[in-house]
Amino acid sequence: MPKGTNQKFKLYRLAQIMHEKTDEEHYITMPEIMAALEAYGITADRKSIYQDLRDLEVLGIEVEGEPVGNRYHYHVVSRLFELPELKLLVDAIQSSKFITEKKTNALIRKLEKLVSRYDAQKLQRQVYVSGRIKTMNESIYYTVDTIHNAISGNRQIRFQYYQWNVKKETELRRDGAYYHVSPWGLTWDDENYYLVGYDEDAGEIRHYRVDKMLHIRMDKEGRRGRELFQKLDMAEYTRKSFGMFGGEEKVVKLLVDNRLAGVIIDRFGKSVTMIPEDEEHFTVNLTVKTSRQFLGWVFSLGEQVKILGPEEVVQQMKKEGERLLRQY
């Protein structure tokens, strides 16, 4: 039989065909394998393909043949990642605020290449990225890489840090001055990514949202604050520093101090509508779950946030305040 022009890619294309077209529920016959190879400009006889299928096992691709009628049906029986494992990874990527929507879709498309085209459709049905609250900082991947390099190289970092204002614009904190930090760890909490490090100016351990760091660079100086970090329980620190809330879903109207615009945007996304009330305040209608965690979140913001409605939530907050008075 004459050889095709792409014979040197034969084993690679065979592996690709088996990965894409077969799984535990989908099989391919020898004539279909030969036709698929021919579509890539590769001709082969049955005997050589039998040997190639055995050779795939050396590459870690286990192929099984099962007799069905007068033919054998072939499929891949094991993969580097099983479908449930990939679903977990997809869920993690989707729920991560620190991964942009653009990068989220790109990562999921890459994960789909690890399964058959049939299982890839099952992953696609899980993709609901549009509308989720995602970071808009496309440089976050460079930022994370620099932080990891600084930690492994025992180096300090410098970066600028931004916040949101009431006009939904970013503004640099400390008037654009660079933060000088010794990075000691990264933590993922409440769908956000945080750097935990020793702040050179404050002289203490602090945390920073990774997606709000800009123009990061690694310094030559070695890290400081080792003694403080060694005494730090990261799990306990994370639990005390960040919070979550859930419960019955309602639309709640809040009166908010303009200085907390960034807090509202961080929690509910940039698409939230903030209506000016006076020179110092704005109102916002939020769909939230009004559990004690939510009320505790409002309470923690002090006089800068007030619940205006609905009335049952106002009364719920009053009862919670009364309960706290009785408790303490």
Image (spheres, rainbow, N blue to C red):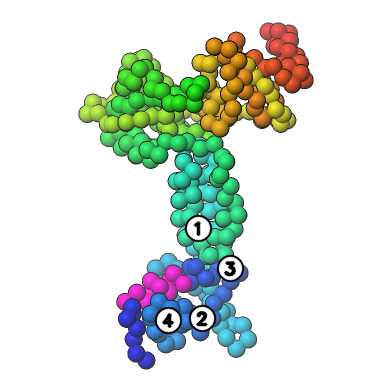
Is 266 on the left-hand or right-hand side of 327? left
Q: Which residue is mark 4?
A: 38
**Real-space CA distance between mark 2 and mark 4, rounded to the nearest whole angstrom:** 10 Å
Is the residue marked by circle 4 packed among few (<14), some (14-19), or many (20+) residues within 10 Å? some
Q: Which residue is mark 3?
A: 24
Tag 2 or tag 1, which sits nearer the N-term? Answer: 2
Q: Quadrant of the C terminus?
A: top right
Does the magenta run of residues contain 206?
no
Residue 106 spot, x, y in % from top left: 45, 51
Query: Residue drawn 64% across and 19% down?
Result: 254
* Mark 3 or mark 1, whichever is nearer to me: 1
Query: Residue drawn 51% across and 16% down?
Result: 259
Q: Which mark is residue 32?
A: 2
Identify residue type, mark 2: Glu
Query: Residue drawn 71% across and 8% down?
Result: 325
Residue 177 spot, x, y in % from top left: 32, 19
**Residues shaded magenta:** 8-17
Q: Which residue is mark 1?
A: 112
Task: Give the image quarter of residue 15.
Answer: bottom left
Tag 2 or tag 3, which sits nearer the N-term? Answer: 3
